[in-house]
Each structure stands twice: as structure tokens, then as C-alpha cells.
Amino acid sequence: MNESTTTTAAAGATRKRRRKDGKYSNKDDDFNNKNDNKSSFDEDDDEDEDKGRKKKDLKGILTSLLLLEEQEKGDQEEQNRASSEDKSFLDENHRKKTRTMLDYYSNLQDYYTEVEQTDRIKRKKSRVLAASVATITAVADSPVEKPTKPGTGAGHGPGSGQHRRLWVKDRSKAWWDECNRPDYPEEEFKKWFRMSRQTFDLICEELNSVIAKEDTTLRNAIPVRQRVAVCIWRLATGEPLRLVSKRFGLGISTCHKLVLEVCTAIRSVLMPKYLQWPDENSLRKIKEEFEVGSGIPNVVGSMYTTHIPIIAPKVSVAAYFNKRHTERNQKTSYSITVQGVVDPNGVFTDVCIGWPGSMPDDQVLEKSALYQRASGGLLKGVWIVGGSGYPLLDWVMVPYTQQHLTWTQHAFNEKIGEIQRVAKDAFARLKGRWSCLQKRTEVKLQDLPIVLGACCVLHNICEMKNEEMDPELTFDLIDDEMIPEIALRSASSLKARDAIAHNLLHHGLAGTAFL
């Protein structure tokens, strides 16, 4: 009883202990399971945090890249806008300078015109005053003149009826008297005056009614032939006025006055007759002559622009500064321009004189009356051939100027060069015949267009009269040509030039000198 009870009690205690241990064991498992779950949850949270942090960093990088890209784009736009503004400013500044320069040139031309008119009025008043003085003197010396004591009056003695005369320095006219003799050798006369006596007499005849003067009570008038001779000698030799004065037995101021008077008469009387744009019949002949020589149709003239050296002017020095001549000659040079169009015989049909030497050939052309007439349709359907310094226009034909020319283009340049040389040779004869154009002259700037115009007219007269020029007078003409900024200004002329070049080469009209 006791043993069984004890056994039973022990078994129960064991079961209780086991249950208790099992209970505790279950509790430990649960705790462990909870700790394991908590650890796994913490690891998942760390991974999520890392992923979030990486995403956030990636977003930050992308945002930074986008911001940098936008900033760079903004900087580029800002730079482009600034560059565009600078370009617009420079273009506007260039236009203003060009407009100012053209206005200045126009005002300068108007100023010279006013000065010329003022001088003309002063000379007219001086002549009127001189005539009045002569009249008063003649009246004072009329037959009622009282006898004067010897040595006290202007007469030659008591009761002398001779008129008073203006005292003039006695100068020798022996050289001119010798040249003016009918038996003076023709070759010598032509050597001094660049023309035959017959042509010289023709000019005197044409100008007689304009430049002839009458004798006055103060002095005898200078004969027409001597007046013309002084002018032509001065233009032909370019001698200083003091030497011209000694040669013709006249005062220096008188020689200067005679040169300007005769040049003005030549320009006003002879230019309308000997230097004019050809009529329809003459243009037809000019076209035929140019086409026979070159194969290029519808050419009515060859154009060239040369520079005439001058002394540095007192106004607008920079405008007349010739940079290209200065660099080539290593000496400061100033000049004015002469643009001319000639026919196949080298006779001028149009001239534009007096624009400053700093202007390139294309700007001189744009300022000329020829350009204005062409814009009005005068030269429609015809060509004037120019060098590379001119632009290609609807009426101006120029050579190809790009590099690596084809055979066709070379052949065209060769033929158009022959036409262009006609004008260049004409200017070489102009400067060779009239030596005053080769060096800086004493003539004032405002008077130069008159003198240069007279030289062109006299050149035409000599060419029309077939006056041969002495080979010793040959002049090497050197003028720099600058290709215009916009050389091609007519699409139709570009096609026409290509067609002419093609015909020249493929119809056997072009040479092979370029090979």
C-alpha cells in the first residue's frame, strides 16, 4: 500500500516535472522562433533600406545630370544669343559706317562743286573789274590829256597821246615762236605735243570761240594757239609751272590759269563730241568687232579702273589713302580713281573720275553714272567686260576667280582676258601720252576731274586721228585688283557665262594658251 502509493506519487511527480519541462521547453521554442522571425524581419528591413538608399542616390545622380544638362543648354543658348547680338551689332555698325562714308563723299563732292562755282564767280568779277579799270583808264587817257612834265607822267613826253599800259615783265618767247613757225619740223612738233600739227590746229579751231580773248588797253591778249599749246604741253610733259612759264614767256599764275581754262573748254566743248556713249549703229559695229576677236557675243565695251597719284589732301586724308600702292612701293601714296569703258580701238565711251583711292573697283562702279544708266535698262542684253575686281552683274561679264578651274573655264578666262586688255592698254597709252598722270601733280584736288577729263578727251582725239605714240612713251600700268566680297550677284549671268564658256571650248573658238 505504501509502496504503491509511493510509486504512484513518484510517477505523478515525474509526469508533473515532465509536463513542466515540456511547458518550459515549448516556451523556449516559441521564444527562439520569435527571435528568429525578428532577425529575419530586421534583415529584410535592412535590404529595403539599402535599396531605398540606392534608389535615392540614383535619383539624385539623374537629377544632377539633368540639371547640368539644362544648365549647359541654357549657357549655350545664352552664348548663341550673345553671339547673335554681337553679329547684329557689327552688321549695324558696318552699315552705319558705309552710309556715313557715302554721305561724306556726296557732301565732299557738293563742297567742291560750290567751291568751283565760287571761284568762277570770283574770276568773273575780276574780269568785270579789270574791264572797268581799263575803261576808266582809257577815258582818263583820252585826247583831253594835259601835258606832263618830263619824267613825271605815264606818257613819253609833253603832249604824248599814247595810252598807259600795264607793266609786264619782259620774258622770252623764242622757244614758242620757233615751234609756231610753219616750217618747224613735224616730228619735233609731235614729240613735244603728242600730236601732229593738223590735229593741234583742229583743237584750236574747235576751242577758238570759247577761249579767244580781245586786246585791252592794259595788255595784248594771249593768242589762242599759245593758250592751247601751254595746256597741252603741261599735260604732255607734266613739267612744273615754273618751267612752263619760262618756255612760253608767261607768268606762272598765267600758265596755271590757262591750263584750267583750256581744260574746262575741252571738257565742255569737245567732250560731248568726242567722248559719248555710242548710238545703235556704233554699238552694232562694236559688238561685231569684239565677237570677231574673242568669240564672245554682245560685248559693247571693255572696262578698267586706274589710280592717279595725288599730294595728300588737306581734308579726308584717310579716304584718299591708297593702301595697296603704299605696301607695294614702300611709300605713302594717295590717289583718286578713273574708271573708263573703251571700244575695240581703245577710244573711251564712258568715264567716271574723282572717287577716292581707298574705294575698291566695285564701289567705284556702283557710284558711277554708268551703273545708274544700266539700272535703268540702258545696257539690257549686252555685256561690258571687266576684270576680277568687278562683280558679275546682269550687264558686267567677269572671269572665273575660284581655284581649280576646268579647261572650259580656263579657255573662257583666256578669251575674256583679251577683251579686258583692250581697256588696260588704252589706259597705258593715256598715261604714257599725258605724263602729268604718272606723278603727283600740282593741280588742286577740286580741279583734278577737269584736268583728267580733258586728258581722256585728248586721248580720244589722238586715237580717232590715228596718232601713233612714240615707243619711248610706253608706260607699264600696274593697278591692284581686289575680288569683291560678293562677286556673284546675278544667277542668270552665271548661267550665261557657263553657256558662253561651253560654246567657246566645244566650237573651237577658245585657245590653248592655258595648257
Image (tube, rainbow, N blue to C red):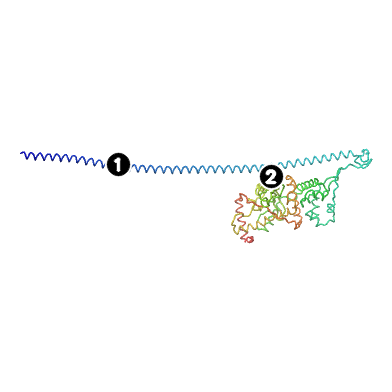
What's the distance in space between the residues labelled 2 and 1, CA to CA? 94 Å
| Sooner in the amino-acid sequence: mark 2 or mark 1 | 1
Q: Nearer the viewer, mark 2 or mark 1?
A: 1
Mark 1, secondary structure of its residue: helix
Name the foreground residue: 330 vs 177: 330
Residue 310 screen position, x and y as percent: 72, 48
Going by the numbered disc 2, the residue's amino acid type is: Val
Hey, which quadrant is residue 58 in on the image? top left
> Do the residues bearing badges 2 and 1 touch, measured as CB atoms within 8 Å?
no
Name the foreground residue: 38 vs 236: 38
Residue 261 screen position, x and y as percent: 78, 46
Mark 2, secondary structure of its residue: helix
From the image, tell me which residue sits under label 1: 42
Q: Which mark is residue 119?
A: none
From the image, tell me which residue sits under label 2: 317
Residue 404 screen position, x and y as percent: 59, 57
Going by the numbered disc 1, the residue's amino acid type is: Asp
